[in-house]
């Protein structure tokens, strides 16, 4: 009797152990077949002695010794299957839950590129607005600085604004490194670019509609050009090349007070660092918070912005960040009947950027440059060796129990 058995794993790889068992059943107590007078067996006896199929044999009532032989053959078959599975169990692939979740988070780099172009255009437009507003700033000899309660109690410290810009550069650098190390950097990157562009667009509006006088008489503003279009273009290019920083000497124009761009970058970079860093890196978060908070305070200590500039910048940055991420993490807030946040003007842009993000983005780090295929294969073998083998052995035991 032949008993082949097939076992198919998750990779559709078939292991076919073959076992051939010859079982000869004898019944000494059965009477001999009837014979004719010439000694030959009858035709009925000859046909009944032909080999039967396993199904026909199972349907008939076998003698006790025949049943024992069948049980022994089945036991030997199960042992041979178990040994075959033990030889091949290390090659069974178990699906990792993290990979299943990653399938729900497509990168869609082209959407990230659109968000980057949006932020780049708004930043360029901001330099144009600063150049336009600079021509409208009243002379400090005619319009003195507005009264500010913080300035009444804290004297100006000249080097404080340098601390602000250094802290801002450190935070932006840390966030850039962290963003490049994230596995889902495409999704997080387009969120960052969209919020930067939106906040600076709001800043363009507030700067243009309300032009405040300089907050202190220590400020030196570049001369006005009035109708000199070529000179204004050169100022725009100089402001872009220096990043709008006083450290580079590119920011000599006044009028960009309401609200503070330095506060926006200090606050937004810290919020992204906090949101997309592991919980166990609490020391890293506290250091970034200290850099952000001290940088914001130094803006006021240097008397470079009014207190209202800093307060409005903080409120606008935190609210936009929290509203956006509330809609990201709560799918019910994306639908108009369920949420008032869906009434924001940027809700269609949000749906465009986040339409295919159906789950929370996990905080997983990976190398910015992918490893070669050989190194990647070794890493997977080392990473999934222990746990994968345990799960495979458990699965093999369950199969044997069902068999």
Image (spheres, grey):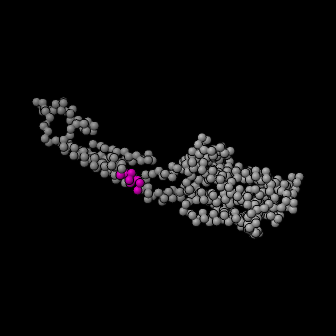
The extreme right residue here reads 227
Residues 105 and 216: in front is: 216
Please provide the residue range marked out in magenta. 390-397
In this rendering, position of residue 90 left or right of residue 174: left
Q: Quadrant of the N terminus?
A: top left
Give the residue at x 68% y 44%.
Answer: 345
Q: Is residue 388 visible?
A: yes
Give the residue at x 65% y 53%.
Answer: 319
Give the residue at x 74% y 56%.
Answer: 259
Please tell me whether residue 396 belongs to the stretch shown in magenta.
Answer: yes
Give the residue at x 63% y 50%.
Answer: 324
Q: Most prominent secondary structure in the magenta stretch?
A: helix
Residues 4 and 253: in front is: 253
Residue 222: give x, y in percent of width and height: 84, 61
Residue 197: give x, y in percent of width and height: 70, 51
In this rendering, position of residue 379 left or right of residue 48: right
Residue 387: give x, y in percent of width and height: 44, 57
Residue 225: give x, y in percent of width and height: 87, 56
Please tell me whether residue 360 belongs to the stretch shown in magenta.
Answer: no
Q: How many marks?
A: 0
């Amino acid at each position: 009797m032949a008993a082949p058995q097939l076992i198919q794993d998750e990779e559709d790889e078939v292991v076919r152990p073959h076992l051939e068992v010859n079982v000869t059943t004898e019944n000494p107590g059965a009477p001999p077949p009837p014979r004719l007078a010439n000694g030959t067996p009858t035709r009925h006896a000859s046909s009944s002695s032909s080999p039967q199929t396993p199904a026909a044999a199972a349907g008939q009532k076998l003698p006790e010794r025949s049943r024992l032989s069948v049980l022994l053959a089945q036991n030997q078959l199960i042992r041979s299957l178990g040994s075959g599975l033990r030889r091949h169990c290390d090659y069974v692939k178990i699906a990792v839950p993290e990979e299943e979740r990653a399938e729900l988070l497509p990168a869609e780099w082209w959407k990230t590129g659109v968000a980057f172009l949006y932020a780049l255009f708004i930043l360029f437009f901001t330099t144009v607005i600063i150049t336009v507003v600079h021509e409208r700033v009243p002379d400090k000899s005619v319009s003195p600085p507005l009264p500010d309660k913080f300035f009444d109690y804290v004297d100006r410290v000249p080097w404080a604004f340098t601390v602000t810009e250094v802290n801002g550069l450190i935070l932006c650098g840390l966030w850039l490194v962290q963003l490049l190390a994230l596995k889902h950097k495409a999704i997080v990157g387009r969120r960052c670019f969209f919020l930067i562009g939106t906040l600076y667009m709001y800043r363009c509006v507030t700067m243009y509609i309300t032009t405040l006088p300089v907050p202190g008489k220590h400020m030196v503003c570049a001369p006005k050009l009035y109708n000199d279009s070529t000179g204004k273009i050169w100022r725009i290019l100089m402001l872009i090349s220096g990043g709008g920083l006083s450290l580079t000497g590119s920011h000599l124009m006044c009028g960009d007070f309401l609200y503070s761009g330095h506060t926006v970058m200090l606050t937004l970079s810290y919020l992204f660092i906090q949101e997309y860093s592991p919980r166990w890196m609490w020391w890293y978060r506290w250091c970034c918070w200290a850099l952000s908070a001290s940088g914001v305070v130094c803006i006021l200590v240097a008397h470079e912005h009014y207190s209202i500039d800093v307060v409005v910048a903080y409120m606008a940055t935190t609210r936009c960040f929290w509203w956006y991420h509330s809609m990201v993490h709560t799918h019910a807030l994306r639908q108009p009947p369920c949420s008032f946040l869906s009434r924001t003007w940027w809700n269609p842009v949000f749906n465009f950027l986040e339409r295919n993000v159906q789950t929370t983005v996990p905080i997983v780090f990976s190398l910015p440059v992918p490893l070669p295929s050989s190194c990647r294969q070794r890493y997977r073998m080392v990473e999934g060796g222990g746990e994968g083998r345990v799960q495979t052995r458990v699965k093999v035991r369950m199969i044997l129990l069902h068999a």
